[in-house]
Amino acid sequence: MRSICGVEGVTAAGMKEGRYGLALVAAGGTAAAVFTGNRVKAAPLVLMEERIARGELDGILVNSGCANAFTGERGLADAAAMAEIGAACLGTDPERVGVASTGIIGRYLDLALIRRQAGELAPRLRHDPAAEAEVARAIMTTDLVEKHALVQGDGFSVGGVCKGSGMIAPNMGTLVALLYTDAEVPAGELREGLRAATRRTFNQVVVDGDTSTNDIAFLTATGVAGKVRAPAFRRALEECARSLAIQVARDGEGATKLIEVVVRGARTERGASDMARTIVGSPLLKTAVYGEDPNWGRVLAAAGRAGVEFDPDRVSLSIGTGELRTPLVENGGIVVDLARAKQAMRGKEVRFELDLREGDREARAWGCDLTEKYVEINGRYTT
Amino acid sequence: MRSICGVEGVTAAGMKEGRYGLALVAAGGTAAAVFTGNRVKAAPLVLMEERIARGELDGILVNSGCANAFTGERGLADAAAMAEIGAACLGTDPERVGVASTGIIGRYLDLALIRRQAGELAPRLRHDPAAEAEVARAIMTTDLVEKHALVQGDGFSVGGVCKGSGMIAPNMGTLVALLYTDAEVPAGELREGLRAATRRTFNQVVVDGDTSTNDIAFLTATGVAGKVRAPAFRRALEECARSLAIQVARDGEGATKLIEVVVRGARTERGASDMARTIVGSPLLKTAVYGEDPNWGRVLAAAGRAGVEFDPDRVSLSIGTGELRTPLVENGGIVVDLARAKQAMRGKEVRFELDLREGDREARAWGCDLTEKYVEINGRYTT
């Protein structure tokens, strides 16, 4: 198993017909969700913000191809109808079914299609590797690869699938994530844990700086594995979410390289996060990484516009990891060896570490390079 | 005349050798400047922030090819030395010489080169069309075209040249702008007028969302034409700055189309500005415009993340100008005719108008499409 079917109490099925996919996951237990920061929220999110408050779900139905966003009253009714369809498949109450949509904005759901697809999926719900792969594929839009993560804790598991490769930005760096654990966790703790993990992982992924109207992450705890220690659960959850977040960055539309930015020595974690995210999202840095061009001034220029106080004359900056790690700036002085710096950019992963030397907080952010392919993919998505 | 030499009391000369250009402009009078919002400020800006406070200049010396940014104490000394060089050419005090630099970050100025070039320019200072063209060309980096503007007021002129095509973002949408007027304007009014014009023009241009360390705009009033009415002066100044800002957007790195976004019906001008800028800067919208793909949902998704309260179910959105103008959304309802919308995207200029129907304030922002060429240009700038 690679993800959600590594968690006891989860059964799943998914399918894709052209650009229209549907995923059905059955797993009863306590549940929580986090949502996009965009003021234009898709209809299923409006519905879920209200319904998730009870803290329990029996399953989740997610469609791809149509976002059901900017669809007004009809969209809300369609989202509720989608929950009804899920409830009928799972033999439960529609209030206990999570729904999410991803795809093109400003189009109405094809409920007849969703009803037919759901009818085909219900008898195929099962707990095996093929089932979790079907779910991961069903929710993909411009994603090139399935995204799975499974973390084994001490006597429990946390597993998840997600989709996302464009419109990935501050405030929920993924369109849809479905996370499960077999630990027994009260709904309040699930919610807090999911918020904390999201802040450090999904929210720190930037592909293009655009924030989706449809970003949503669900977390359901089946409780099959019994009670666990809260810190151990939070660690496993964050690790699972981080793995998915990095997979999203790596699969950024048109990406050839993963970029990781570490900001250390900040006065606050918030400041470090903001700065790491601003740097990793800089189009100029992203194109420089694509061109393997050690134009490190762009890192500092981006740091300077992050809204965080610091003294540029004190910072240290390095590029690369392991043996290829090489300093660019030390204590505010330029020490770069351009040939070595270029060498450090050759691989599939490029890491920048910036030390502000102002405090002891740090944060990370992930992104990808900006390539001609991103332009090609996004210049021709609807038509 | 197309720009600064259309203003009485201005003489100019410029040259370019490979990527290293130098522009010298002589014009004595009251003066003001506005600066980048980036916390990493290039050395010449640090120097100018202090020196411009006296409100008078006799001339300006600008180099291209090296930004003199992130160069510490040595950079500050180099900027001061550059003012000395300008002063020697103009026969004035270094405190009365404006300096600016644009180009690569993290490299030291070649003062010997600047000294030699300035020595060649000083005897060539003159008041003619070729001189203003030399200045416009001398300050270009990745710009493809010279940027000139000249506005005739009632008995006075405002003229300017500028450079900028990448790293153009909120908080000073241009790297270097040199503005002149022959009106007699006190330094305080010059400063206020320049700030207001900048807020509505240069600050509303987004090419890639990156904010430069070197953005600076100077405004000098020679006073040759005598006193003028303040509102008339401000209108002419804003018109001149807007023309330059639009030229910057149109010449965005790799751009094939100018994008104009108008946000109307906002409660505050600030809210309208923020939203217009967020929309025009959206990479997803920029790529859609490039592909002539009427994916208008991206306009609303970007509006939703601008940090401005509004009700998506009330807005109206249209695309195009004149006969090609076609509605996409009316009072929150989707009314788009995709074929007509696509038609409206065919030209060299694409305009979106969003009416929030919340108040009576409006603002504009300008940008350009995002193309493979942007990636190519920025992937290979230093090396």
Image: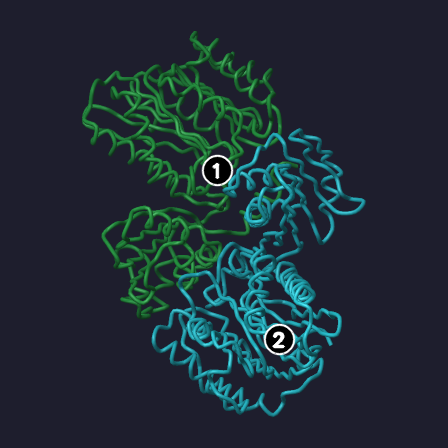
Chain colours: A cyan, B green
- Residue at 61% of width from left, 52% of height from top? A365
Local secondary structure at mark 1: loop
Question: Which numbered disc covers residue B144?
Answer: 1
Quarter of the view holding residue A147: bottom right
Residue nearest the viewer, comparing A100 with B330? A100
State whether residue B10 is above or below residue A222: above
Tell me the quadrant of the picture where the N terminus of chain A can be found: bottom right
- Which secondary structure, mark 2? helix
What number is the disc on residue A186?
none
Which residue occupies the extreme top position in the image? B91
Task: Judge whether residue A283 can be spotted in this image.
Answer: no
Residue A39's spot in the image, x, y percent?
A: 40, 61
Towards the viewer: A282 or B375: A282
> Which residue: 52% across, 16% down?
B80
The residue under the point 24% across, 29% down is B233
- A171 over A120 or under it: above or below: above
Q: Residue at position x 31%, y 60% from top?
A: B318
Picture layout, residue A376 above or below residue A56: above
- x and y percent of residue A256 in the render? 66, 55
The residue under label 2 is which amino acid type?
Answer: Arg
Q: CA distance from mark 1 to mark 2?
A: 44 Å
In this rendering, position of residue A227 left or right of residue B43: right
Q: Residues within 10 Å of mark 1 (few under 14, many from 20)?
A: some
Left or right, B197 with respect to A300, comes to: left
Between B245 and A131, the one nearer to me in the picture? A131
**In the figure, residue A75 lies in which quadrant?**
bottom left
Q: Which residue is mark 2?
A: A137
